[in-house]
Image: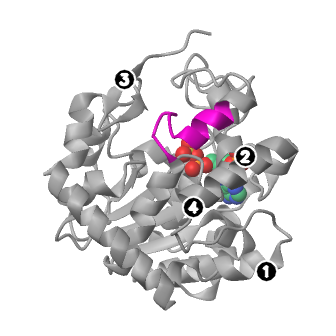
């Protein structure tokens, strides 16, 4: 099936032309955030949809009506998509839940001075790469993935649509030191402790829940229940845009699926690139579900308190400030 166009680079990054254009990008960069807004931010395939579901459930006290009747691109539109302006204008839901894959340095001017609550979702990059590879096979609005080896190289070089995972994660996570209204949550943390994550999110969103409401949030955000939900599983999207014979959007939902795709050599190369690009970054990632030592560390990723981490974050914050000045 024919692939749709990828737009020219915007601030050095390619975006799918089916959903983005220069006007929609400008709209995102100048968006007047309201203090009541909730902004979900992620690099693709990091648990974006899962977070959209959890936030919708929390703000509706566990009631699944909204998530079962309104597609996620309407109830939590991607700010940079061409339809976002119309959807947000027509929406009467408060709080507005908005999603984005854009980098912090691009949105910083729009977010400056806003009290909008920002949730950054990240996932271990090996699983992101595998999930993204499979999604490229089915999403005709993205370029063809080629072999997994070719795709992995592009992922590591940061030349895929939406840019570099490394830059994205460093750009946003560095803001936890300076942005009081930013919460960093990982996919693995949701997977390993969904109840605890929901409690933490409901507290951050100032939407305390009773036990029954938490139970409903857990139930309706499970992989099995989301997999069958047409409002998020992409089955409402026409087959010429998303071809479900090639893969599925709700594919496996696991930690460590990369082990089924990576050769030893690819893994070694990945580790080397990761080590070099993340050398001053204190974030830890869970690479497989049974890795208890790492999973213990990830639970604390969003509340980094070590002196070393603070120094790194301050450094990143200064760099981000310079980037903001350049953007302005
Ligand atoms: N509830 C739940 N539990 C576990 N895993 C889940 C869940 N919901 C979504 N997913 C998995 O998240 C992956 C899709 O990521 P995104 O939603 O960020 O994709 S997108 O950027 O919006 O296209 C994709 O990962 P893979 O299965 O590894 O491809 C989804 O299966």
Which residue is labeled 2 in the image?
A: 269
Q: Earlier in the sequence, mark 3 or mark 1?
A: 3
Which residue is labeled 3 in the image?
A: 7
Q: Earlier in the sequence, mark 1 or mark 4?
A: 4
Which residue is labeled 1 in the image?
A: 293
Which residue is labeled 4 in the image?
A: 64
Tell me the crowding category of disc 1: few under 14, some 14 to 19, or many 20 or more residues within 10 angstroms, Cα based: few
Local secondary structure at mark 2? helix
Tell me the crowding category of disc 4: few under 14, some 14 to 19, or many 20 or more residues within 10 angstroms, Cα based: some
In the rendering, which numbered label is found on residue 58?
A: none
Q: Is residue 112 left or right of residue 39?
A: left
Q: Position of residue 100 (x, y in %)?
A: 39, 50
Give the residue drawn at x 23%, y 65%. 321
- Is residue 252 something one can see in this rendering? no
| Closest to the observer, 286 or 81 | 286
Which part of the image, by quadrant, shows the N terminus? top right
Local secondary structure at mark 3? strand
Q: Position of residue 96 (x, y in %)?
A: 32, 60
Single out the residue that lies furthest toward the top.
2
Local secondary structure at mark 4? loop
Q: CA distance from mark 2 to mark 1?
A: 23 Å
Q: Is residue 305 above or below residue 177?
A: below
Q: Earlier in the sequence, mark 4 or mark 2?
A: 4
Q: Earlier in the sequence, mark 2 or mark 1?
A: 2
Q: Earlier in the sequence, mark 4 or mark 3?
A: 3
In magenta segment, residue 161? yes
């Amino acid at each position: 099936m024919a692939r749709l166009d990828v737009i020219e680079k915007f601030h050095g990054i390619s975006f799918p032309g089916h959903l983005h254009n220069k006007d929609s990008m400008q709209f995102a960069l100048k968006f007047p955030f309201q203090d009541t807004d909730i902004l979900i931010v992620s690099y693709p395939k990091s648990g974006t949809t899962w977070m959209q579901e959890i936030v919708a459930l929390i703000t509706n006290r566990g009631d699944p009506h909204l998530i079962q009747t309104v597609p996620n691109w309407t109830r939590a539109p991607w700010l940079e998509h061409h339809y976002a302006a119309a959807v947000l204008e027509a929406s009467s839901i408060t709080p507005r839940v908005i999603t984005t894959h854009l980098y912090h340095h691009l949105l910083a001017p729009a977010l400056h001075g806003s009290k909008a609550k920002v949730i950054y979702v990240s996932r271990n990059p090996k699983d992101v790469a595998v999930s993204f590879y499979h999604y490229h096979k089915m999403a005709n609005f993205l370029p063809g993935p080629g072999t997994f080896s070719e795709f992995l190289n592009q992922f590591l070089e940061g030349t895929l649509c939406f840019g570099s995972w490394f830059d994205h994660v460093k750009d946003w996570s560095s803001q936890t030191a300076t942005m009081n209204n930013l919460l960093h949550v990982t996919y693995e943390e949701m997977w390993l402790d969904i109840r605890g994550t929901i409690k933490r999110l409901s507290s951050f969103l100032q939407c305390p829940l009773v036990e029954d409401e938490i139970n409903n949030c857990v139930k309706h955000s499970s992989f099995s229940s989301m997999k069958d939900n047409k409002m998020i599983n992409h089955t409402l999207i026409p087959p010429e845009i998303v071809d479900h014979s090639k893969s599925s959007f709700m594919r496996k939902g696991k930690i460590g699926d990369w082990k089924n795709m990576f050769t030893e050599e690819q893994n070694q190369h990945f580790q080397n690139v990761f080590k070099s690009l993340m050398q001053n970054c204190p974030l830890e990632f869970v690479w497989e579900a049974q890795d208890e030592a790492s999973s213990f560390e990830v639970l604390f990723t969003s509340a980094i308190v070590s002196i070393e981490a603070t120094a790194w974050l301050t450094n990143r914050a200064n760099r981000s400030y310079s980037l903001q000045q350049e953007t302005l």
